[in-house]
Amino acid sequence: MTKLWELYKSETWIEPFLMLSIGVFILTSSILYLLIIRSRSSKIKRYRLLAEYNTVIENLMFSVVFNDIPFSEVKKDENLNKLFKNGFFREVLIDSIMNLHKNYEGIYAQKLEQFYKESGLIKDSFKKLKNLKWEVKCKGITELSEINCTDAFDKIVKASKGRNKILKITAVNAAIKLGGTKSIMYLTRYSYPIDDWTQINIINAFKKHDIGDTTGVELLLESQNTTVIALGLKLIKELKLTQKIPYLAKLIANTPNTLIKYEAQNVLQILTV
Amino acid sequence: MTFITTELSLFFEGYLFLIIVYAVLIMSSYLLLAHLSTRELREYLKKNSFVDYDVLLTSEFAPSLSLIAPAYNEGFTIQENVKSLLSLNYNNYQVIVVNDGSKDNSMEILIKTYDLVLTELDIHPKIETKKIKGIYTSRNAAFKKLIVVDKENGGKADALNVGLNIAQNQYVVCIDVDCILDKDALLKLAKPFLESYGKRIIATGGVVRIANQCVIKNGRLVEVNIPDLMLPRIQVLEYLRAFLLGRMAWSRLDGLLLISGAFGAFDKEIALLAGGYSTKTVGEDMELVVRMRRYMLENKIPYGVSYIPDPLCWTEAPEDFKIFKKQRSRWMRGTIETLGLHKKMFLNPKYKLLGMVSVPYWTLFEFLAPGIEFIGLVLTIIFVILGLLNWHFFILLVLFVYFFAVMFSVIALYSEERTYHKYPKQTDFFKLLIAAFIEPIYFHPLTVYAALVGYKEKIMGTKGWGEMTRKGFTKK
């Protein structure tokens, strides 16, 4: 301590300290500058590759969807075979198939699903589903649900039970698409609060995927978790489920929670008008 | 003589110690905040890539918003600006334009363009304001979201309070009428209000960026450019640093004191309970956030303040020094007034992180920094002249500060590059890089000078905003 004080008093440290700091600042700035340049170059390279791959993929998808070319034929093309081994190409291809699948229905959508399975791209999605990083898992879930892969249903429902909100929303959304109401039945025993944003997303999934069979939605009203009951009420209101009126009446008669009672009365009034 | 020399020498040693400690403290706090900000930003972007904001567009459960846009002598741009506000991507909202006694033809333009007629609104004012001359709505169903209030001039805070009194929705979004909003701005601003359970989100704020020389078409930003003029160009860099490397960290720490007056959303009930905007300060945006937070803490209500790092709002920065000086001196007065009004919070553990960290930080590094810097520079020069400090050391000290400032700007550029990448043109990047080198010797002294003018104005009792003229955006 005394030595330190002596060093401080001697003031000999100041100049080396300042010079070292200046050096560190200049070095850091230079490194960051180089990193910016590298990032910009890689972005340019990526855009160029993307444009190149998109041209190849466009032709490939046209052949698959409209000319009924199976994957076994595609494999014979050496150039495509080589590209299929490239991770970035596969990612771009998956994104393209997802976008096309959103826009096509019926036979064309089925052809895309078939190609997705035969080409092994589905394995990439399953790998993502197993990944420990939630963002990768989300990507896998989105892909598998878009392609209507019902084999993934159980794994997706499992993922929806976690506490990571984004993963939960993505998984619940996907599960509703693949399995309808049964995929949210576990919520009746769910003990964590579900915020309004998650609730709105669940309701939107029902509307978006046009889930006709709403058997079991009434079970949400029996939950001990008030946010799950609120979700049930919102679903009944938004989907105009008049067949659930008796359950609403039961909830109004039994719930000790005044907010829930008031909301249930409100929904009941809307449905009976 | 020997006694004086000894005293001076002791003073010099103490001064040297203090100045280095202060510099190291301020620099390390900047770096710490930048680190926290970057981490938070990365996390936000990762999460945001899976968010479907469109669910809010179709949901009847989306929060209802009232946009309040005070206007004073905005006749030049008001027609297009209001049109842009009416065409935002959101369903459940109304637009309240408050004409704060403009001396120009703003009202005539609004009445004519939007086919406005006087109307009777059943309002129960909670905050006292200047007299309302008339409330107008449109006869045209296409503008049914629009309410225009014509009132006596009372300043921005008073106009915002009129908006708060009139707003019919649960949340109010206070904006500058001349700002260009991203079309999804309201969707992004509304989402945090739905996200918390067990605590009430009382305010959300967004990032403001500089739009000088950017191209605007039909009230929307279509091309991002970096200004050629050095003053607005450096402000682009300054805003990047403040919003990307500062506020995100304060948000993470839950110590955010300021939501920009240009663009922020508030829980109307809490804003009214806290007393609305203060007309006693020119820093009404910061003051309201501090007062709302204080209200929640004093009443022990769990709450949160959220912050969206996406560039949602684009504004015009002053291009000439006169206007710049007015703006910055006003900001300084606003800071002094807010900190003065809430001095009770300073190092008061009752106010948690806000009292123990945020308020002291603002006092030390925002309010006092320009003064300390100026006094430090003057004293250092005196010491050099007196021979107590050699030139070599003085130059090292200057270079130390200079290169830190450059490095910090480059960190901001790196963060922007890795996140939003809004300036993809090579020329724009180099323009900003040049600005980073010029800023410490050109722009920074101007901000210190303007802040000192702010001190002086506060001491002299200057009130009000002063006239702020704007050039208007480049339109396509």
Image: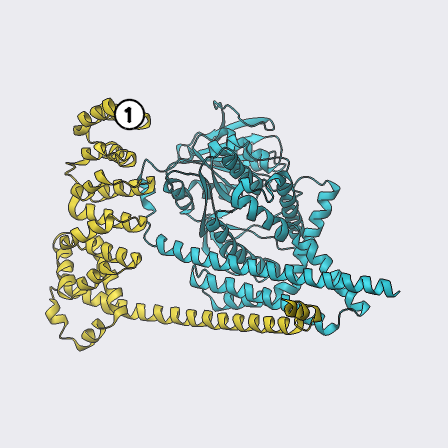
Check the picture and name the quadrant holding the N terminus of chain B: bottom right
B385 shown above or below B222 = below
Q: Residue at x 60, y 48 (%)?
A: B360
- Chain in cyan, by letter, is B
Query: Residue B295, position in %: x, y?
Result: 52, 35
Q: Amino acid at mark 1?
A: Pro
On the question of residue B322 being in view, the answer is: no
Kind of element beneath mark 1: loop
Residue B194 quadrant: top left
- Between residue B163 and residue A191, name the one nearer to us: A191
- Between residue A126 and residue A235, name the one nearer to us: A126
- Chain in yellow, by letter, is A
**Chain identity of mark 1:** A
Query: Residue A253, position in %: x, y?
Result: 23, 22
Residue A254 quadrant: top left
A228 shown above or below B454 = above
Please state if B118 lies on the left or on the right of B405 as rendered.
Answer: left
Please state if A91 lies on the left or on the right of B32 as rendered.
Answer: left
| Residue ID for mark 1 | A256
Residue B142 quadrant: top left
Q: Residue at x 16, y 29 (%)?
A: A243
